[in-house]
Image (spheres, rainbow, N blue to C red):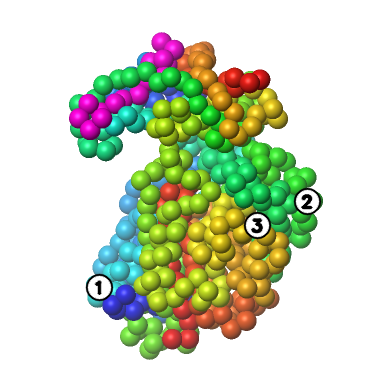
Amino acid sequence: MFERMKKIIFTESDQATQKFYQGLKEHKLLTTNCLDCKKLFFPPQVVCPQCLSNNLSWVELSGRGKIYAFTQQERGPLFTKPDVIGLVELEEGIGRVLTRIEGEFSELKIGMEVEVSFVDVPNFLTLHQFTPLEI
Amino acid sequence: MNNKVAIIGVGMSSIGRHQDKTNLELAVEVIKDALKDAQIKKSEIEGIFLTPEGFTVRNSKVRVARLAEYLQISPHSVGVFECGGISAMLACRYAANEIALGHNKINIVVASEIEIYEEELRSNMDSLIALNALFMPYDSAYGIMTATPYYAMSTQRYMYEYGATERQIANLAVTLRENATKNEKAMYRKKMTIDDVLTSRLIVPPIHLFETCPMADGGAAIILASEEIAKEISPSPIFITGIGEFHDASHLFPNFKPITSFVAVEEAAREAYEMSGRSPEDIEVAEVYGAFAGAELIIYEDLGFFKRGESAKAVEEGKTRIGGEIPCNTSGGRLSLGHPPYVTPLLEMVEIILQLRGEAKERQVKDAKIGLVHSEHGVVNGSIVMILEGGL
């Protein structure tokens, strides 16, 4: 199933998404920045969502943020179960990212500061995950 | 609307499992019920509007032509509408518009859904990939198959921001179940307590199993007519007096916006109230597309029934029960009636129409004449709200 999901993600994604996943493989959290209207946005796109310009540059995000919300999925097929996933508010103020959160569900709290790391899933993709700084 | 449109006939199946039937058979069954209810002949139908067959199944193309052939109806206009959970409401909106524009006089909207479940679903790679693909290209990689984790995080924030308690959220599920005990079409009709909810499996915290909408098979059909026809042939036509629609620039989880209020519902409701000249206080009975207990509480607030953060307490005080200030989901709602998403908006309409006709039996809201139907898609990213009135 992973092979098929990976293939779908790559064949059905635009250039920006493919480059984002390539960035993860190199352990970088990337997004696009508009060189015309100067808007930094996430996730990356092939056009700027503000001015529709294609004149974009790639930037690496700091990978720091705060936990906005989190839950635990019983059937998350990718990791050792159970699997904590959550929303992290990115430090750059460009919104939230859905990610895996490394840590015990019962020890996590809304507002905790977290930092990105990368996890290589065999036969699949490299994904971002965030770890609390305090635990 | 310039030219008024009324609903003159409804039909719906029981909600639960219809695995022994084909989708077409289920559709035909509810169409026959609606024709009988409206007391019209199939040859009088000028437009047929459908929704897809399901989320886990392969959807056939041009299914409306197959249905027309099967029933030997030659319609003036047709369509199959897809936009997640609002699909059936979109089909209704189009059917109503075709009448309001004077193109057709009588239209039917039909939704029938038969899904794949449990082991068969888990072993069906195509179905799993189709479910996962909805969350492409980013969230899907984390194994997300349903919107439940998003709703879990929305409910977690609602509890965090407003202090709603676990017991208050469970109480909503109990209230809906109480209504379902009076509805012979509902999937779950056994009485339930708050403790039953809180001891059910914690599937995606803070959401317990009994706080989720069960996937279900089911069908429904609605017959719409022009004011002229409705007044001539229907003893109790129910008029559409307002429709509002709004879609936020987001799909599933918005990057920036709050997840403890849904702008799509607020805006769609505002438009529907404005069009009908009604306000939240005028609504006597409402059907709400709440797929999870926590989300339903938020939507009550978006619709203006309660102030921000006050739904949980209002439900605890019985304000949404039959006999309360604003009875919500007298059908049992998505949690207890059962939830075939491509059919649900029609099920909601059927309930409100029965209420406004005074035909809701044991769950009748006394003298209800003004009702509201809410529908949504995604994680409430888009919404259509409809106001229905009887006795006009």
Residue range (magenta) = A23-38
Image side of residue B321 versus residue B6, left or right: right
Q: Which of the chains bears the disc numbered 1?
A: B
Give how far across and how far down residue B83 sits, in percent.
39, 50
* Residue of label 1: B101
Q: Secondary structure at mark 3?
A: helix
- Say which amino acid is labelled 2: Asp
* Cα–Cα span, label 1 and label 3: 42 Å
Q: Would you identify the image quadrant in which residue B359 lies?
A: bottom right
* Cα–Cα span, label 1 and label 2: 51 Å
Image position of A113 with respect to B257: above or below: above
* Residue of label 2: B196
Residue B347 shows in the view: no
Q: Are marks 2 and 3 on the same chain?
A: yes
Q: Would you identify the image quadrant in which residue B154 lies?
A: top right
* Residue under the image location 51 percent in, 30 percent down: A88
* Residue under the image location 37 percent in, 18 percent down: A60
* Residue of label 3: B312
Q: Which of the chains bears the disc numbered 3?
A: B
- Say which amino acid is labelled 3: Ala
* Residue under the image location 49 percent in, 22 percent down: A64
Q: State the residue lying farthest toward the top.
A: A26
In this view, the mark in front (2 or 3): 3
Q: Which of the chains bears the disc numbered 2?
A: B
Image side of residue A80 versus residue B196, left or right: left
Of residues A35 and B116, the one nearer the viewer is: A35
